[in-house]
Every structure is written in structure tokens, then in C-alpha cells.
Image (tube, rainbow, N blue to C red):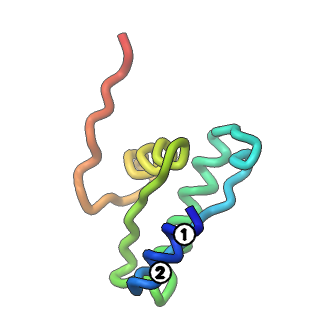
Amino acid sequence: MVTLSRSLADLGLAVYVPDLPGFREDRLTGTALTALGADIRCFAGFRHVRGHEVSLMGIGAGASLAILAAAGNHLQCGAPSPSIPTPD
């Protein structure tokens, strides 16, 4: 993740890698998702972030958090949120 983040930053992109509660212990919780939402809103306000628009990406569990954050009502998404099917 560090190498990818540095490569994106080298391209001139503003990059933020969060350190979410419980994540280092392999625990995904609502607290982590709430913290991620707050971090994204804060990061979007930085002067280095063009247009105050943020793209999310993740690998493994981070991808799950990115999808949940983007689909959540607490963030305004530039693209329509995908419909996530629920298991029967």
C-alpha cells in the first residue's frame, strides 16, 4: 500500500492512507466506517485536493470499506452508487 500511495503521489495526486480504529487488528467495525467518513470529509477540504473531490480505492478489506463509504448516505458521490445485492 505504501509503494502504491507513493507512486500516486509522485503523479501529483493528493493521497491519504487512513489508520482506522481496529484495522491493524483485522477488525472492521462501524466505528472504522464512521472514522473513514469523517476522514474523507476532512481530506476533501484540504487545499491540495482539486475541486474538493475524493476518489476511494482499497485493497482487500480496504476495498470493502471504500465501497461502503461511497455507498453511504453521509457522503455525496459524483457517480451513482452501485446497487449492492443482498443475500437471500
Residue that protrudes farthest toward the bottom in the picture = 47
From the viewer's perspective, is residue 43 above or below residue 26? Answer: below
Q: Position of residue 7 (x, y in %)?
A: 46, 76
Q: Secondary structure at mark 1?
A: helix
Q: Amino acid at mark 1?
A: Thr
Q: Amino acid at mark 2?
A: Ala
Q: Nearer the viewer, mark 2 or mark 1?
A: 1
In three-dimensional space, the C-alpha distance between marks 2 and 1, rounded to whole angstroms, equals: 10 Å
Q: Position of residue 5 (x, y in %)?
A: 51, 70
- Look at 43% across and 82% down and name the residue there: 49
Residue nearest the viewer, comparing 86 with 25? 25
From the viewer's perspective, is residue 7 above or below residue 75? Answer: below
The image quarter in which residue 35 lies: bottom right
33 left or right, relative to 48: right
- Look at 73% across and 51% down and name the residue there: 21
Residue that protrudes farthest toward the left in the picture = 80
Q: Secondary structure at mark 2?
A: helix
Residue 65's mark?
Answer: none
- Total marks in image: 2
Q: Earlier in the sequence, mark 2 or mark 1?
A: 1
77 left or right, relative to 44: left
- Look at 36% across and 84% down and name the residue there: 50
Q: Position of residue 31 (x, y in %)?
A: 67, 45
Residue nearest the viewer, comparing 33 with 7? 7
Residue 9's mark?
Answer: 2
Q: Quadrant of the N terminus?
A: bottom right
Crowd class of label 1 (few under 14; some 14 to 19; many from 20; radius 10 Å): few
- Look at 39% across and 83% down and name the residue there: 11
25 left or right, relative to 71: right
Crowd class of label 2 (few under 14; some 14 to 19; many from 20; radius 10 Å): few
Q: Position of residue 39 (x, y in %)?
A: 58, 65
Circle 1 residue: 3
